Amino acid sequence: MPSNEEILLKLIQGDAGAQWASTHIGWKVPQSAELAVNVCDWDGVDCDHSGTRITIIQLTESGLAATIPSELGQLPYLERLHLDNLIPDGAGLTGTIPSELASLTNLVDVNLAFNSLTGTVPTFVSAKLQTLNLSTNSLAGPVPTEFYYGSKGHGYLLCLDLSKNSLTGTISEAIGQLQKLETMSLSDNQFSGTLPASIGVLRDLRYVYLNNNHLQGTFPTDFVNPDAQLSEVWFQSNLLSGTVPIAFGQMDKLRNLYIDDNKFTGTVPKELCTDLINIDFVDADLYDPSTGKNVSTCVRLACPENTFSTEGLWPCGPCPDESSSPYLGTQGECYSSDQRTLLNKFYEITNGASWNIPNNNWMDASIDECTFTGISCNTNGHVTKLSLPKANLQGPFPNIIGFLEHLNYVDLSDNFLTGYLSADLQWAPIDHFDISGNKIRGAIPPWLCLTSGLNENGDKGHFRCSLVACPAGTASPIGRESITENIKCQPCSNGANIVGLKDCKDYNPEDAGSYYYYYDAPEMTSTSSTSGSNASRTAGIIILVFSIVGFVIVAALIYARNLKAKKEDEHEALKSNISSMRSGSSWSLTNREVI
């Protein structure tokens, strides 16, 4: 077993490490025994009352350049580890976070922010953990469900900051296990899927930052809890749709609610249109010189439909001619209503110059767009069909095709499209939709699953997302299910995380970020065939398994809720620490960031 000194000196690496050590007490090998410094007196190191057990390593802004040695996992009494950098363009940590470090059982406060750490987020097992800050690194991949449980639960976690990384996948419903969570920052990542309803059970939650991701779908019914302590909620720059819940207006402590640059429709609930919301970002003066009157305070949350602004909230301006926006908080520009303009954007987004089609005439300004290869129009000259399968289309999925108001047939199968499906598609009367064989990630928007007439949805009362495209984690020979052809999406065992997959073997982990599992249970229909019986039996087994898992989760939630009443005094000091961290922050009004 190495000594404490030997373990700490593993942080001193290369010439840069030696230079750093020369300016910090205790961190260099002494010339003689007389010059030795007790390890508990080294710069940034502290011990418990025994004088032999290291409990704190705090080297914030020290300029240390190193990888995190796995040997730190041999400091069993370590409670606080602060190796955050904070020095702009300064030296910092590289490499991965060792599992040995995450396995320490006495960790209370971990801050590794503002470094260049890579790899995935490990599961920290300490049940005592109260703050975990891994923000502003280069961590990637999904956050495993086990992360939210640790070995004995994280019932005392107050602050979780994973912002400004490259994390993917969904935000697990297991986040509801963090019963004492006050600050949750997952912003500036690549999370997709829908919002977890379990956030609604976190009654101590005050600060929620989920902005700048790819979150989809609507607010779950139980997501907004009027009894919560929410003060700041940032959802801007996602793909969220539906309407803004009126329940936000029942939260008397709410001061910041950013919803712009999403796909919300309708109006901002009048209960949210007060002089208190977003006052620190939007100027108190709401005078509109074009009308000579003050505008509604609702614009502090989002510009109304058919208007836009740089930030998606006040000051707002009307959409230019031949453009509009059905959304609240439109940012940057409105959506063109001219089909030629929309097709030109489609060409640009999908790298039209590299398409593999005969007679690529899309950039010929002398011809009508109805004669473009892959385009068909009705007798009125409106685009009704877009068919470019196996055409080498590349880039993010072109959701703007949803603004082609007469489009009813879309076949973009077997291309190289990435990105996510958004609510833009709801505006076109699409009844045939084939996106199979691409690299599209995330969830299938719920409203697509409920659109009658889209593929086979609505036939004989059947409505399933899998009729639109096989959800991530599943595959079928046509990339979706078919009722008439009795084709089902089958689970993949290789972590496939793209939608519309035709064969699990086609999945390449480098093509798409993380595993997003979705199981769309088959509807139970009567059949006399053996295969139908087997399918029903398989479905029953899966449903039973999910029921058992659901029971375990509910039991865990009840246990966590009961645990909440105990040992309230154990984290008061850390609450003060979090408060001081926030009060020491500065605002960047241009980007709405806490620096």
Image (tube, rainbow, N blue to C red):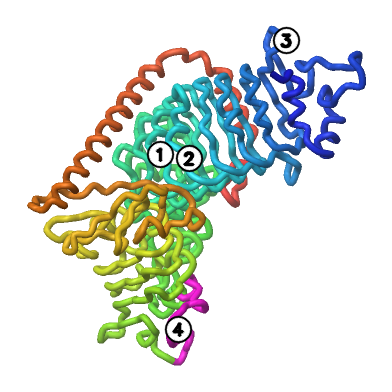
**According to the image, label 3 marks what residue?**
51
**According to the image, label 1 marks what residue?**
172
Label 1 near label 4: C-beta < 8 Å? no
Give the SS element for disc 1.
loop
Specify start and end residues of the magenta stretch as a single range: 347-366
Label 4 near label 2: C-beta < 8 Å? no
Sooner in the amino-acid sequence: mark 4 or mark 1: 1
Residue at the image point whose x is 53% and y is 29% from the top: 124
Compute the Cα span from label 2 to label 4.
42 Å
Question: Label 1 sits on what residue type?
Answer: Ser
Please indicate, yes or no, whether residue 266 appears anywhere in the rendered image.
no
Question: Label 2 sits on what residue type?
Answer: Val
Q: Residue furthest bottom?
A: 366
Up-down relation of residue 50 to residue 365 (above or below): above
**According to the image, label 2 marks what residue?**
143
Tell me if mark 1 has few (under 14), some (14-19) or many (20+) residues whose alpha carbon lies within 10 angstroms of its own: many
Residue at the image point whose x is 83% and y is 27% from the top: 24
Res 408 → quadrant: bottom left
Compute the Cα span from label 2 to label 1.
8 Å
Give the SS element for disc 3.
loop
